[in-house]
Amino acid sequence: MSEDTFDAIVIGAGENGLVLGNYLGKAGLKVLVCERRLESGGGLSTEEFTILGCWHNTGSYYHDTVQVTPIYQDLDLVNANTVYIHPPVQSSLLKRNGESLTLFSDLQQTESEISRWSKEDAQTWRRHSEAFHSALNAHYQPYLLNPAQNEMGYEDFDSRLESTPLEAVQADFKHPMTQALLLSHFMVPRGILSNYEGAGRFLQLVVGTAASNRIVEGGSHELAQSLWTEQLRNNGWVWDSTPIKRILIEDGQAVGVETSTGRKLHAKVVVSTVDLQTTFQTLVGPEHTPQELARQLQAYQLEEFSLFVIHAVMDEAPQVKAKDDHVSRALRWTLGFESAEDLQEHIAQIQAGEAPNRLGAIVSCPSLHDPSQALPGKHTFLLWQVVPSRLRSGDWSDVAASYAQQILDWVSEYIPNLKGKNILKQVAMSPQDLVTKWQYPQGTVFGGKSAGAQLGAARPIPELANYRTPIKNLYLGGAYMHPGAGIEGAPGYIAAKVIADDLGISIPASI
Amino acid sequence: MTTNGDREYDGIVIGAGHNGMILQGYLLKAGLSVAVVERHLEVGGGLDAHENPRAHGFWHNIHSQNHRAIPNLPWFKDLNLASYGQEYVWPEIAVGMLFRDKTCLLWHNHDIEQTCASISRFSERDAKTFRDFHRRFTPVVQSIIGPETFSPPMQAEKKRELLEKSELGKLYYEFADRSISDVVEEVFESDQVKAMVTYLFLLRGNEITEVGQGYVVPVACAAGISSTISRGTSHRMAHTLNQMVIKNGGDVYEGQAAAEILIEDDKAVGVRLADGRILKARQFVVSTLNPQQTFLDLINGDKIDSHLKKRAENFKYSITTPIMTVHLALHERPVWAAAEYDPNVMKAWLMVMGVDSTEDIRVVLEECAAGEVPQRLQLIGGVPTIFDPTQAPEGKHVAWFWQLAPYNLKEGPEHWDEVIDELCEKEIKLLQQYAPNLNNKTIVDWFGQSPLDISRHLPNMQNGDWMCGELSADQFLDKRPFPECSQYSTPVEGLYLAGSCCHPGGNITGAPAYNAAGVIVRDMKADLWWKAPELEKIWSNLPAESLAKGVS
C-alpha cells in the first residue's frame, strides 16, 4: 500500500477519533487519524502556559465514566501510561455559610454525609447508586455503547424519557443541596441544563457516576499520548498539523481526503469527528449534501451554554471556607449553587445570552491530587464558570478580562486566599477562545444539545443517527453522536463497531 | 511512560531532543532495543512550540525556527520521516537584509542568479565574487563539507595530509586556515554583503574570529542558506521523531529525568530515573546532554577519573550565541518599508535589521562581552505564517525576532527577569522602523524570552548557549567536545555522547546522532543498515587536478 493510501482515514484526533482509530487498527486496518492542531487529543489537552513546571488541563479534566466505557481494558491503555487518580473526597457543594454536602468514593461515607441533611435523600442515593451498578452491564452499557435507541428496556431510565432533569431530581430528592449538587453534575460534565426535555432519563446515571471522578496522572493529555502511542503500535498513523480541506467524493462515495496543502490521501472508509456544520458545509460541501440532510442540519441545535475557564498558579494551596475539614480535600467544588432555584436563575441568564451576574462554578485544585502537575510548593487552580456560549450583545473578547476578575472576586468569598500575591499567574479562556483554539462550534464544548428529539434514536438528527451518512463509506464519530451526555470515547467506540460491521471485520470491542 | 519497576534494554539514550530520537531510530532499526528518557513531559528539546495563552490559536516556536535543508538530510530519508506526514516549506527567498536607508539585500533559497542580481545593486564586484565562489566551492560542499558533517571527525593532521593532495583540498585550506571575519573583509567590498555573510554565520553558531572556520564564507555562497520551515511549527518535527521511535518499537520515558548513569566495573550499565526506577542497559548508555551534566552531574564522582572530570569542567560555552527573543501575535503580517526598493522582500523568510555593516556586529559583540543589556539593537527573525498558515488562526500571523544578548549580565543572569520586557518594547520600536504597519492595533500580543529563559527551559544549553559549546578551535571537529570523546565514544566503556556538544555542534542537523549511530552500531556489531559517507575513502580519491578550476 502506498504512503498515501489507507484503509481508513479519521478526521480529528480528539478522544473519539483516537479511540476509533485504535479499535480499527487492532482489527488489522491501516488507519490514519488527521489532526488540524499541532497537539493531538482535542479536549485532552494539558499545557505549561503559566510558569515552567506547572501544567494546566485546558480542556477535559474529570473523567467519570472510566468504568462505564471499556476502552481502557480493550485498548490496554493502562500499560501505555494512563494512570488514573481517584481521590476519596470526590465532590463538595459548598455554601456561602460554610455548610457543604460532599460525595465520597466510598458509598457508605456518602450515605452518612447525605443523611446529615436528609435521611430520605441518603436512602434514595444508595438505592440509585446500587441500582446503577447492578444495571451497568445488562442495561446501561448496551444502551450507551451501541447505536442510538430511545428506550433502554429498564424502568429507571425509560420512566423518565419525558422528564427534565429538574423534574427528575425534584421527584426523587428533597433537600435543596442534594438537588443543587445533582443538577450541577448534570450541567458539568454531562452537558445538560436543568430544563432540557427528556434529559431527566440520565438521573440514575448521574447519581451512579457523581463519585467516580478520576483524573489522569500527569494531566489529561497523557491519555491522548497513550492513545496515539497505541495507535502507532497497531499499524496506525496520527498526523498532526494536517488540516483537512475536503473529503474526496466520487460517485456518491467517500474515497479519501485532501489536506490543506493539497495532498490527496485515499481510503476505503472516511470518518469525521469534527462538528456537523464543518463536516457537511466545508468538508463534504453543499453539492454532495442531500436536501433533507441539509434541512435537518439547519434545525440542529447546539447547547446554549459553555464554560468560561480560569487557570491559575497559586503560591499556597486554596483554603476553602468550610465547616467540615474534608471539603478542602475534595476533587471538585461546586460554588454558587445552593438550591435548584439558584441553577434556574443562572440558566435563565444563560438562555437570555447574558454573562451571569452571579457565581455558578465548578472549581478544583488539581495539584492537590496530582502533585506532578505543579512545581513543588506551588499549586494549580482550575475554574469553570457556566456561561452562555455566545452573548446576545457584544463579543466575549470585549468582556473576558473584566469578567475573569469578577469571577475571582466572587470565588474569594469561598476561597479567601485566592487573591493578590497568592495568584502568581492566571490565564482566562472565554468561549470565544475555545473557537480559535479548538474550532469548537460557536464555543460550545458538550457536543450538541442533549434535549428532546436530539436525544435517543434520532441523535443528532434522524438522517445521521446510526453513524452512517448518505455518502457511502463516510461515517461520523464525534461527540454529537449518541449517547451524548459526555460518555467518554463512546461515539468513537460505537463508530468503530458500525464500521467493523459494514466491513465484516472483528474489533476487540468487549461490549 | 509509566511501567512498574525496573526494565532492561540493549541501550538507553538520555535526552529526547532531535539528536536523541534520531539516534534511537537508527539503533532500533539496527535491531537493538532502546529506550529514551526525557525530563520534560513533551519530547523535542529545542524543537518546541507553545500556544499563546493570551491569544489562543497562535503558536510560537520557542527555540528552533529555521531548519536547513532538512528533507535532503540523510536521516530524514533513512528514517522515512515524510511518511509521518512531516512536511517542509522552502521559502523562495531565504534571507532579507533590511538596511537603515530602506534598501535591502536578498539571498534567494535556490536561485544564485537572483541573489547575484540583488548583490550587484550594491556591488558588481561582490556579485561576481559570490557567483565565482558558488561555482568553485560547490564541489567543496559536495566532497568535503557534506561528508565531514555526517561523519565522525577525522584527526586534524590526517585530514590535512589527505586533503592537501588534491586541488579541492588546497582550495579548502586557503580559506579554512583563516577566520570568517578576515575572509569577509578580504573578499567582499560592500558593507552590505560583508554584514550579511558575517552576521548569518554568527547566528549559525560560528565563532567569527576563530581561525579554522574561514571556509564557511565561500562554502555559504555555494551551498546557500537552504532554509526550510517545518509545517505545523518546529515542534511538529518532535512529534514526527517521537512517532518514528514508537513505530520502530522504541520506548519513550517522558517526564522522567535521568538522575544517574550507573557505572559498574568501569562500564556503563544503566540509568537511574529521578523516581528511583532503574533502566538497565545491557550494552550502552548514550548521553545527548552537555559534558558537565554527563560527567559531573550524572556520574558518581568516585566512578570517573579526574582527567575526564577536568575535561568536562573546562568545556566552554559561547558568549556570542545567546539570544533574546521577542515573539509577536499579529492581526496582519509586517509590510517591509524596503518593498519599495525591491518588492521581492515580501517573500523573504529571515529578515535582518540593524546590521548595516560589520561595525554594527562588532559593537554588539562588544556589548555582549561586557555583559550589557543590548543597546545597539539588531534583529533577525521571521513570520512563519507567510509560508505556513497553520501556525496561527486563519488570516492571522505569528512572528519571532532574535537579538544577540549576553547570558552573563554584569548584574548577574537573574537580572534578565527585570529587563526583558523593557528590551522587548525597544525591539518592537526598532521593528516598527522597518515595518511601520506594526502598531497597537495590529499587534495582538507580544512576549519576550531571555538567555536565562533558554537555560531554565533546556539546562543542556548552559549559559543560554544553544550551540551547546563554543565552536572555538579547541572545541571544533576532532577536538569536540574534547579529544577523548570526539568519536562519540568516551573513556567509560559502553558510554557514548551524541548531543550538540559533539561534532558538528548545535542547530537542527541531526549529525551528532547520525555519526554516533554508526559508531555504536559498529561497536555493537549490529546491522549497519544505512550507507554513511566513508570520509577517508572520499578524501583519498579527490582528483589531484581540480574540477574546481572549471571553465572561466
Image (cartoon, coloured by chain):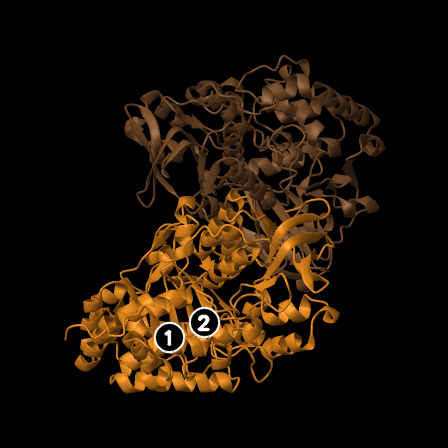
Chain colours: A brown, B orange
CA distance separating discs 2 and 1 = 10 Å
Please tell me whether mark 1 sits on a helix, a strand or a loop: helix
- Whether residue B53 is visible here, answered yes or no, is no
Discs 2, 1 touching: Cβ within 8 Å: yes
Q: Which residue is mark 2?
A: B154
Type of amino acid under label 1:
Leu
Type of amino acid under label 2:
Met
From the viewer's side, name the closer residue of A403 and A467. Answer: A467
Residue at (50%, 80%) from the top-left corner? B474
From the viewer's side, name the closer residue of B389 and B150. Answer: B150
Looking at the image, is mark 2 or mark 1 earlier in the sequence? 2
x and y percentages locating residue B131 in the rendered image:
21, 73
On the same chain: label 2 and label 1? yes
Dot label at residue B162: 1
x and y percentages locating residue B487 in the rendered image:
52, 68
Residue at (43%, 26%) from the top-left corner? A475
- Judge whether A183 appears above or below A498 on screen: below
